[in-house]
Image: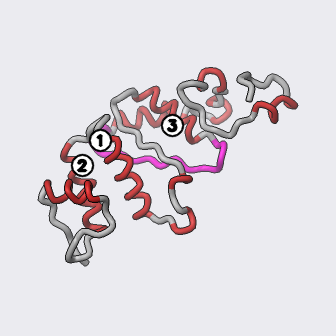
Amino acid sequence: MQNYQAKRLPEILNVTELKPLNHDNFQSFFVETDQARGKNIALHLKYYFESKKDTPQKVLFMGHRGSGKSTELFRLEQFLGHAFKLVRFSIKEVDIIDFNYIDLIFLLLDKLYKDNDKTPLPDSDLRALLNCMAVIKYNGQRWCGLHPAVIRMLEERGLTCISK
């Protein structure tokens, strides 16, 4: 596919590539829409996160394909720098037919665990996450359904579990 920005309507189909913008193509293809939308959503979220930085915050970007979720997340990442940890995932990584909040929590834990070597979480945050997982997945007798490395992390931290 050619790497240029369409200038006329008929060219749009020839250059449309339904992939999120990233570091490599953001400057070439980003179109400013803040004025039409009424506000800069990424900047609004930046101010929100900064005002609540002592309290864990979670935001889930949802919307139809092409609505700008990844673009806004990329912009937010540019505004925040390394002050906050962003966890990216795609719906393609899950079974959307049977997806629930527990699957979302496990997906997030998996992403955080795999990324922990690059950007470690504070132990208190990791402990809280693992404790949450333990409550969900402990069956009263043994750990079930967790990656062996996660089980070791739970046991190393002496986490207790609620079994019900």
Q: Are marks 2 and 1 in contact (CB under 8 Å)?
A: yes
CA neighbours of label 2 inside 10 A, class few (<14), some (14 to 19), many (20+): some
Mark 2: amino acid? Leu
CA neighbours of label 1 inside 10 A, class few (<14), some (14 to 19), many (20+): few
| Bounds of the magenta segment | 53-67
Q: Earlier in the sequence, mark 3 or mark 1?
A: 3
Q: Earlier in the sequence, mark 3 or mark 2?
A: 3
Element at label 2: helix
Element at label 1: loop
Q: Marks 3/1: CA distance?
A: 20 Å
Q: Which residue has dot 3 on it? A: 73
> Would residue 141 be found to the left or right of residue 114 on screen?
left
Find out whether residue 149 is within the magenta segment: no
To which quarter of the image does residue 84 belong? top left
Q: Are marks 3 and 2 in contact (CB under 8 Å)?
A: no
Q: Which residue has dot 2 on it? A: 126
State which mark lies toward you, 3 or 1: 1
Mark 3: amino acid? Leu
